[in-house]
Image (cartoon, rainbow, N blue to C red):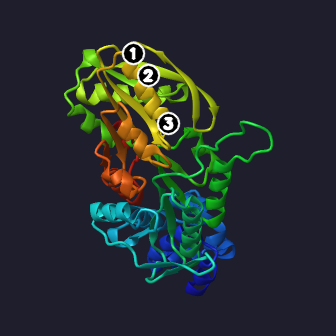
Amino acid sequence: MNRVFQSTAGFLSRGMRRMARSIPAQVKTRIFSKPSLRTVGFAGLGCGAASLMACNLIPEATPAHAQELKDSVKIVLQTEEQPTLDDMKIFSGTANFTLANEIAEELGVPLGNLSIKTYADGEIGIQVNENVRGKDIYIIQPTCPPGVNDNLMELILLVSTMRRASARKITAVIPYFGYARQDRKMQSRVPISAADVCRLLEAMGVDRVVAVDLHCGQIQGFFGPRTPCDNLEGSVVALPHFANLNLKSESTIVASPDAGGVHRAKHFRDRLKKRFGIDAGLAMIIKQRLRANAIERMDLVGNVEGCDVILVDDMIDTAGTLTKAASELTARGAKRVFAYATHGLFNGPAVSRIEKSELEQVVICNTVPLSPAAAQCAKIKQLSIAELLGEAIARIHYRKSVSVLFKK
């Protein structure tokens, strides 16, 4: 009987194999001693037949045998292996090693041993210096500037390396998702680059993606149903900072620097009220562009006279929109103008524009490492998002709900 069981066990799924190994030997013998069951075999029966036997719906299985099998199955299901900290491995690419180290400290695990080098011809070489077989891998790599394409290729190769090394599950933690602004066709004969990046990651074998404040939420849908994408909100980190600025409900306005970000600003305002009782107003600036990174004019919708204004956006690139919006709000009578954006890219003249602007303070998260010039700017305040990402990773690893993070 054991030979029959062993020959059929090879066709079982991993979960059924574990269940089959846990069933007492005498139960296996009794099951396969019945002619019909011996012919079909445990693999042919599958979960459905096992349930039928357990429920005494197969005539050949006596009530005593069925109850014994039912109790064994119950024990197996109750003692299903739960993930442990030893099953978790955190690896970092070169894009934001500081953030990855902070996340590892939050989780209480060391960063994985990994070698990444660039050859003379510009190619990237990767080697994992420890065993990852059967482990749950979390790769922290924003595809941010400088070197967006290098960071993206590095992430793709990291996923491929872990998959070829027989990792059990691979989660890509991408605090800043490069190419996110190219999420639709605005004119003829252009790619939808955000969708193409998602397909590249899926093709390499990533199992799950964790991002922070994607430029547009529909990017989550560019991944197939077998690759869940969690879009965390960086405002969870920023809200306590603004609550400590002595803001008053009657004289605080949350503003969006463009029409497309009104929902984001409204969500920020609602959370500010829910968590800290600051019932701020809402305003919007409508901008008309000449071309990318060049704005022709701005119009304000709402009243900001005598108010403290918080401009809310998902990212700051060259800071042209942000500084022009601050000037417009100041001209309309705003008392103080703050800005919050999850991702601080600060490309080109961004830092000099911020230093010369009417902005009181610019608050960002550390999803993208600051340039030396940005780090020295007194108006730029960087907050760590490591705790939020660490909790998200822990919840994913221990199979707990991630939606709790959206209710903070």
> Dot 1 lies on which element?
loop
Residue hosting label 1: 332
Whether residue 266 is visible to the viewer of this picture, yes or no, is no
Q: Quadrant of the N terminus?
A: bottom right
Which label's residue is closer to the chain start, 3 or 1?
3
The amino acid on which the numbered mark 3 sits, given as a three-letter code, is Gly
Which label's residue is closer to the chain start, 2 or 3?
3
Position of 271 compared to 140: left or right?
left
Q: What is the x, y in percent for residue 273?
A: 29, 24
The amino acid on which the numbered mark 1 sits, given as a three-letter code, is Arg
Real-space Cα separation, disc 2 to disc 1, in angstroms: 6 Å
Q: In the rendered structure, are the residues bearing label 2 and label 1 in contact, judged by CB atoms less than 8 Å apart? A: yes
Real-space Cα separation, disc 2 to disc 3, in angstroms: 12 Å
Q: What is the x, y in percent for residue 295?
A: 57, 30
Q: In front: 180, or 349?
A: 349
> Dot 3 lies on which element?
helix
Residue hosting label 3: 320
The amino acid on which the numbered mark 2 sits, given as a three-letter code, is Glu
> Dot 2 lies on which element?
helix
Residue hosting label 2: 328
Real-space Cα separation, disc 3 to disc 1, in angstroms: 18 Å
Image point 39% across, 66% down: which residue?
97
Image point 61% across, 76% down: which residue?
123
Q: What is the x, y in percent for residue 175?
A: 45, 53
Q: In the rendered structure, are the residues bearing label 2 and label 3 in contact, judged by CB atoms less than 8 Å apart? A: no
Residue 105: quarter of image: bottom left
Residue 96 sits above or below residue 308 on the image: below
**Crowd tier of the residue under label 1, counting other residues whose Cα lies within 10 Å: few below 14, some 14–19, many 20 or above:** some
Residue 405 sits above or below residue 166 on the image: above
Image point 29% across, 15% down: which residue?
306
**Crowd tier of the residue under label 2, counting other residues whose Cα lies within 10 Å: few below 14, some 14–19, many 20 or above:** some
